[in-house]
Amino acid sequence: MPLLTGCEVGQRLTIPVKHGEGCFFADAELLAQLQAEGQIVLRYAADNPNGSLDDIAGVVNADGNVMGLMPHPEHAVDPLLGSDDGALILGALVERARERLLTPA
C-alpha cells in the first residue's frame, strides 16, 4: 500500500478523530468488493467514534493512490500532541509526491 509504506500490517496507530459525523457506509456488494480487493486499509481498533460500517476508518481506490480516511494524521505528528503516528501516513504521502515529481512522464 503506497500511502501506508511507513506502517506495518496490523499496526495500531494513535490518530485523533476530530468529530463523530461522517461515518463510512457501503452496501453489502461494495463492502465485499472492498474487502476482497484489499481496499480497506484502516479500521478503528477500540472505539468506533462515528458508527462507521465494519469499523472502517480508511479506504483506498483500486490503484491504491487515493485514500479517504476519517482520522486526522495531521494532528498526530509530534509526541507533544499525544502521538506522532500521523507522520507515518503523511511521510508516505510526501514520498509518493516526490516520486511523481522525479519520474519522467
Image (spheres, rainbow, N blue to C red):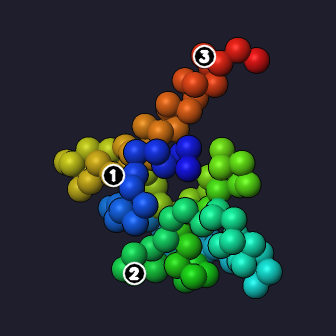
* Label 2 close to label 3 by CB (< 8 Å): no
Within the image, what quadrant is residue 47 found in?
bottom left
Element on which disc 1 rests: loop
Q: Closest to the observer: 7 or 20?
A: 7
* Label 1 close to label 3 by CB (< 8 Å): no
- Spatial CA distance of label 2 from label 1 is 18 Å
- Spatial CA distance of label 1 from label 3 is 27 Å
In the displayed structure, 61 sits above or below 12; it is above
Q: Closest to the observer: 69 or 50?
A: 69
- Residue density around tag 2, few if under 14, some if 14–19, many if 20 or more, within 10 Å: few
Counting residues from the start of the chain, the first of labels 2 and 3 encountered is 2
- Quadrant location of the C terminus? top right
Residue 47 — which label?
2
The answer to whether residue 22 is seen in the rendering is yes
Residue 67 in the figure: left or right of residue 42: right
Residue 45 in the figure: left or right of residue 67: left
Counting residues from the start of the chain, the first of labels 1 and 3 encountered is 1
Q: Closest to the observer: 42 or 17?
A: 42
Mark toward the viewer: 2 or 3: 3
Q: Check disc 3 and give the amino acid type.
A: Leu
Q: Check disc 2 and give the amino acid type.
A: Asp
- Spatial CA distance of label 2 from label 3 is 40 Å
Q: Which residue is mark 3?
A: 102
Q: Residue at x 55, y 62 (%)?
A: 41
Q: Check disc 1 and give the amino acid type.
A: Asp
- Residue density around tag 3, few if under 14, some if 14–19, many if 20 or more, within 10 Å: few
* Label 2 close to label 1 by CB (< 8 Å): no
Q: Which residue is mark 1?
A: 85
